[in-house]
Amino acid sequence: MCGEMDKLGKNIGKVPEIFKDLEKTDPALHEKILAFDNLVWSDGALSRQQKKIIAIAIAASLRDEHAVHAQIAGAKNLGIKKEEIEEGLRVAFLLAGMPAYVYGKTQLEEAYR
């Protein structure tokens, strides 16, 4: 299962500790989440890179620090440009307001230093 956890880390940027624990405490749920994660992040009508930008915009809108950091790390691993993320954050700004944009932009600037 280690290979699957590595794939999860590549998909989202960083595997949360609670998810690592789930592998031991509830292996059946852990397996289902991995399968769903792989389905969601697979290229389809949207590329993995496009999905990552959407994820960052959503995480910024929710002001979820852990998710923003993990998703930006994943975006960097995929070679997504800072400017592409910036455009996604502008969409978050339009739909979720200035706090979402400022939060995401602050995290983006920190990650791309």
Image (cartoon, rainbow, N blue to C red):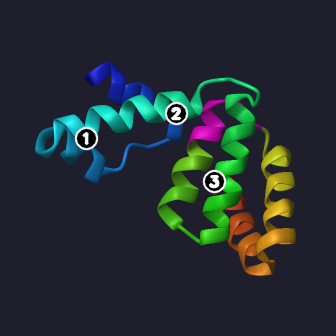
Dot 1 or dot 2: first in sequence order is 2
> Which residues fall within the magenta stretch?
74-80
Front residue of 103/48: it is 48
Q: Nearer the viewer, mark 1 or mark 2?
A: 1
Q: Position of residue 52 (x, y in %)?
A: 66, 42
Residue at the spot of label 2: 11
Q: Give the left or right position of residue 36, taking residue 19 as reference.
A: right
Q: Nearer the viewer, mark 1 or mark 3?
A: 1
Of the residues shown, which amino acid type is indicated by label 3?
A: Ala
Q: Give the left or right position of residue 17, taking residue 41 as reference.
A: left
Q: Position of residue 72 (x, y in %)?
A: 62, 48
- Classed neighbour count for the residue bearing mark 3: other residues with Cα under 10 Å, few (<14), some (14–19), many (≥20): some
Dot 1 or dot 3: first in sequence order is 1
Tell me the CA gap for discs 1 and 2.
18 Å
Q: Going 81% across and 53% down the picture, which residue do you hit? A: 88
Question: Where is 48 relative to 64, above or below?
Answer: above
Residue 40, by quadrant, is top right
Mark number displayed over residue 111: 3
Mark number displayed over residue 29: 1
Q: Going 82% across and 70% down the picture, which residue do you hit? A: 95
Q: Nearer the viewer, mark 2 or mark 3?
A: 2
Q: Going 66% across and 60% down the picture, which residue do you hit? A: 58
Q: Position of residue 70 (x, y in %)?
A: 51, 50
Tell me the CA gap for discs 1 and 3.
32 Å
Label 2 sits on a secondary structure element that is helix
Mark number displayed over residue 83: none
